Amino acid sequence: MKPFSKLRPTAWDGLVVLCVAALAIALALFQWRTGPSQGLTAVVSVDGTEIDRVSLEDAAGEKTYQAGAYTLTVEYAAGSARVRTSNCPTQDCVHTGVVSRGGQSIVCLPARIVIRLEGGAPAPDAVDAVLG
């Protein structure tokens, strides 16, 4: 059999490899510069509709949220949030305690209020993924 001459790399192949490598490096630098440097934010939603957004960088104080017949008093501190009081029957939102990392949430099912933390740096021992 006669060897096929088009199977050897050409200058255009090298140019494509260099472009892909440059693009990969540029995206890595962009991700590194704009990574998880945003501050921690508490997002409060009722029935899936966002009603409040509180920056926890230097937050201090309390806010009251009402949904239906239920009232929650949420206490914000620098870098954390917790439900201090609630008149819901199960008190699961109060027993959740303090949340202080992005991705954590407090849920009050009877009131349909969710307090979700977004942003912030991930914990050094945080789990990347859970399968199964």
Image (cartoon, rainbow, N blue to C red):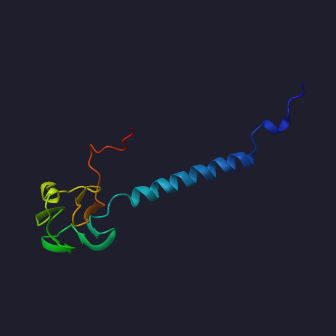
Is 48 left or right of 15, judged from the image as shown? Answer: left
Q: Which image quadrant: the N terminus?
A: top right
Instruction: Give the quadrant of residue 36.
Output: bottom left
At a point 82% along the width and 39% down the height, the residue shown is 6
Image height check: is 131 above or below 89? Answer: above
Q: Position of residue 86 (x, y in %)?
A: 12, 66
Q: Residue at x 45, y 56 (%)?
A: 29
Q: Nearer the viewer, residue 23 or 35?
A: 35
Residue in front for this viewpoint, 89 or 41: 89
User: In the rendered image, which quarter is residue 125 located in?
Assistant: top left
- Please name whichever residue, 27 or 54, is drawn nearer the observer in this view of the structure: 54
Residue at the (12%, 72%) spot, across then down: 62
The location of residue 121, given as percent across then percent down, is 29, 55
The percent position of residue 30, horizontal first and vertical second, equals 45, 59
The picture places residue 71, in percent across and down from the top left corner, at 15, 71
Instruction: Pick out the residue farthest to the right.
Output: 2
Instruction: Report the quarter where the C terminus lies.
Output: top left
Task: Decide: is 42 above or below 125.
Answer: below
